[in-house]
Structures are given as C-alpha cells and as structure tokens.
C-alpha cells in the first residue's frame, strides 16, 4: 500500500513516521521550498507524548522541551484560582512538554529523513487538488497516484476546500492573540504554565527551553489575548505576521503580579507575532473515497486546553494503526469513527472556554478579586471543570495510563 501525505507539519510528519514504523510505504509532499523552524511555543500533553515516545522520540523531546510540572489559573489581579500538577507529577506515565513549535517540527523532520530517507519529504510541491480515484494533482500539473491520500495541509487545506467549497474562511471569534518569546527570570519553580485573566483579556506563559533553565533563566513563550468589539474583520490568519506592541501592550500595563511581571515579559520579546483566534465548524465526514483529512485540515480548534498539536499527533497514530491492521476502505472508516467525533467534541468544548472557564467564573463572581477562591467557586466545581475537559480531550489519567497502545502488533 502506498500513502501520500500532503503537508510536512507536525501532523503530517508524525503520520509519516507512524506509517513507516507500521510497514506502510509513505511519501510526503510539502508546499514550501524550505522548512524552517517557525512559530513559537506549543504544549504536548501526555497522550501525545505517549505516541511520540512509542515512535522512539522520548530522548529528543526531553532534550528539547521543558517537562511541565504544574498548571496555574489566576485572575487578572494575579490571584490563584486553580492549581494542578501536570505530567509525571500528576501520576501520568508520560511527561507533558512545552516546546518551541519549530523545534518540534525540525525534530520530526530529522527523524523522517533519517528513517525513510532524504527523499521522503518532497519540498516545493504544493497540492492543487485530488480526485476520488486516489490521485493528487500538484500545482505544477503533475499527478501522483496513491492508494490513500492524507491531507494534513492545515487550516487553509486545499483538499478540504475542494470537498467543501462553500465553507468559506475560518471563523473568527473576535479575539486576537499576540505571541512572543522572552528570556526572563524563572517564576513559580521554572516549570509552571500560567493562564491569567478572563475571556475578554488573557495572558498565558510557559517556559520552553531546557537550556535556559540550565543557566538559571527561563525562555518563556507568552500569549496576550484580547477580544475586540464587533466591527471589521481582522487581517488574514498567519502565525508569522509581525505584531505591534501598541495594539495590545497598554492593556496589560497594570498586570504586575509580583511573582510574574507581565509588562516586562511582553517588553522583553525581540519579535511579536499576531494571530486572530479562529476555528471551523466540525465536519460530518472527513473521508471521500481513499482521501481523508488530518490535523488542522480536519478539525482546526481554538488554542484552548493545549490540544491542537496533540490532537494532530493522535490523528496520525490512529490512522497508521488502522491502515496497518485493516484494508484501506475499512481502515479509513475506522480512523474517522475514532477521531472525528472525539475532535468535534473538543472543537465545541473549546468554544465554551474548555478548562479556562474557571477564569471567567472568577471574573463573573468576583471581578474585584477574592481572599479565598473557594468562597467564590467551590472546590468541587473547580475540580469538575478540570476533570471533564481531560475526559473530553482524551487525557484523563487512568484512561491514558491503561489504554492499549496504538503501535500495531507485529507478526
């Protein structure tokens, strides 16, 4: 069986590694002429780290990412709403990592080239369309035949657009993210992810570089988020569009929590990127003949709950498992049955703020702050929000620690 993967992002490269490990021939086509380590930080939750570990990448992740030990939600005054351990500290069998997105992509690319050969990823070969017979048409007019085509070509997927031409652009929720990376002093032990504020204004930060920690510093990925009133649409989404401090930094000037000085973190970034927060409505089907979708092409979601990259990795592993254990048609049906309902639930949960809902509860009930958060939000309510989202997103501890592996059995 030959599989063609469109897109050499995190999902596409993980699919290539997973298919190769399962004995399925695979070729990747990527639109850009050169893959560069672009972007800023992302989180890999334990369910995704499990899959990358089973692909033999545990040491590379540990060398390039920061193992997150705690997650803290705070209000806009810096008062703690909820704290929970993460990764190994929470009893998972696998860590949670914060890592630079470009670092992860290059790590995956190096593994693909080492295992599949230097020609496994063909660069500068953009997808223009597909036909149901299982052929990919490239932008230069060449046709490529395959038994299965996997479109992992992102939120602006050409393949998704072909099957859903009336869908239109991604849906903007009137929030804009500004993202940067700053070298700063460690906070809260140096391995803590912080989310502060509420739905209208939020600041997120977490360390992403173990080398900085080794020299007593913290290279922090941060996200400043604002909601804009109804009005004109924002500029087209592109992670690499330069942002302007004057568009958002004044709104965070008073956010000095003592343990975290938000204005200093923002000012310390050498570059800032902007991105409108968008997603798409869940689809009723991903698969058309021998063609299917994966990652952001299938289920773009708001960056809430740290799930985008992790879900793409889970897609890739599930797809490879089914293609290695079933005939192609049955495998694609099983893949979609596994992954489409699960990711659709996450897309909708993220529209409702996911686990970050506790910050809005605190803002609604105690906008001026509180002395004891449990007098504002009972502890069992806080626990319920955290637990329910882990279940929706597929990383509640007991299920993850005990479920069967997605590595296909060997003969």
Image (cartoon, rainbow, N blue to C red):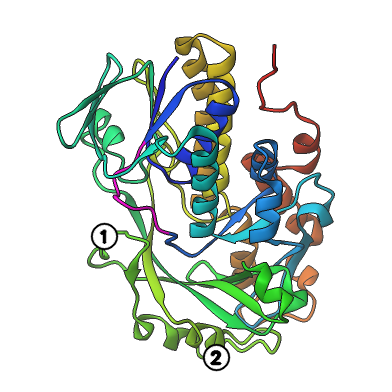
Residue 19 relative to residue 193: left or right:
left
- Is residue 1 visible in this depiction of the protein? yes
First in sequence, mark 1 or 2: give its number: 1
**Membership of 35 in magenta stretch:** yes
Identify the image quadrant of the C terminus: top right
Residue 404 relative to residue 180: left or right:
right
Q: Position of residue 76 (x, y in %)?
A: 60, 79
Local crowd at mark 2 within 10 Å, few (<14), some, or many (≥20)? few
Q: Position of residue 173 (x, y in %)?
A: 38, 58
Task: Tell which of 41 and 214 is nearer to you.
Answer: 214
Residue beneath disc 2:
254
- Label 2: state its secondary structure: loop
Q: Are marks 1 and 2 in contact (CB under 8 Å)?
A: no
Residue beneath disc 1:
236
Q: Main secondary structure of the magenta part?
A: loop
Residue 143 relative to residue 23: left or right:
left
In the image, residue 314 sits, relative to residue 243, either above or below, namely: above
What residue do we see at 29% from left, 33% from top? 159
- Label 1: state its secondary structure: loop
Tell me which segment is drawn in magenta.
29-36
What residue do we see at 57% from left, 84% from top? 262
What residue do we see at 70% from left, 18% from top? 409
């Amino acid at each position: 069986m030959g599989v063609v993967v469109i897109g050499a992002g995190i999902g596409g490269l993980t699919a290539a590694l997973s298919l190769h490990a399962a004995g399925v021939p695979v070729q990747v086509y990527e639109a850009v002429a050169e893959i560069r380590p672009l972007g800023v930080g992302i989180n890999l939750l334990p369910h995704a780290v499990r899959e990358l570990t089973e692909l033999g990448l545990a040491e590379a992740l540990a060398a390039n990412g920061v193992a997150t030990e705690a997650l803290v939600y705070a209000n806009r005054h810096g008062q703690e709403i909820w704290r929970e351990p993460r990764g190994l500290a929470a009893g998972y069998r696998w860590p949670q990592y914060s890592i630079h997105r470009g670092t992860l992509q290059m790590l995956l690319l190096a593994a693909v080239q080492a295992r599949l050969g230097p020609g496994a990823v063909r660069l500068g070969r953009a997808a223009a369309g597909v036909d149901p017979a299982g052929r990919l048409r490239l932008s230069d007019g060449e046709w490529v035949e395959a038994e299965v085509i996997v479109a992992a070509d992102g939120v602006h997927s050409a393949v998704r657009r072909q099957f859903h031409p009336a869908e239109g652009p991604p849906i903007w929720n009137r929030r804009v993210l500004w993202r940067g990376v700053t070298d700063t002093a460690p906070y809260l032990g140096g391995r803590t992810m912080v989310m502060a504020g509420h739905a209208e204004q939020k600041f997120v930060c977490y360390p992403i570089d173990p080398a900085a920690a080794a020299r007593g510093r913290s290279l922090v990925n941060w996200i400043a988020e604002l909601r804009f009133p109804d009005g004109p649409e924002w500029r087209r989404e592109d992670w690499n569009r330069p942002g302007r401090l004057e568009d958002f930094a004044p709104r965070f000037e008073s956010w000095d929590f003592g343990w975290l000085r938000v204005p200093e973190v923002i000012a310390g970034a050498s570059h800032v990127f902007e991105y409108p927060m968008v997603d798409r409505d869940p689809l009723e089907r991903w698969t058309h003949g021998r063609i299917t979708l994966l990652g952001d092409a299938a289920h773009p979601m708001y960056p809430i709950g740290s799930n985008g990259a992790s879900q793409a990795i889970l897609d890739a592993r599930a797809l490879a498992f089914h293609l290695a254990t079933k005939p192609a048609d049955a495998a694609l049906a099983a893949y979609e049955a596994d992954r489409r309902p699960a990711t659709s639930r996450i897309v909708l949960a993220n529209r409702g703020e996911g686990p970050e809902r506790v910050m809005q509860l605190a803002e609604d009930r105690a906008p001026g702050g509180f002395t004891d958060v449990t007098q504002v939000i009972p502890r069992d309510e806080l626990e319920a929000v955290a637990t329910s989202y882990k279940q929706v997103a597929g990383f509640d501890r007991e299920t993850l620690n005990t479920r069967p592996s997605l590595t296909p059995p060997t003969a």
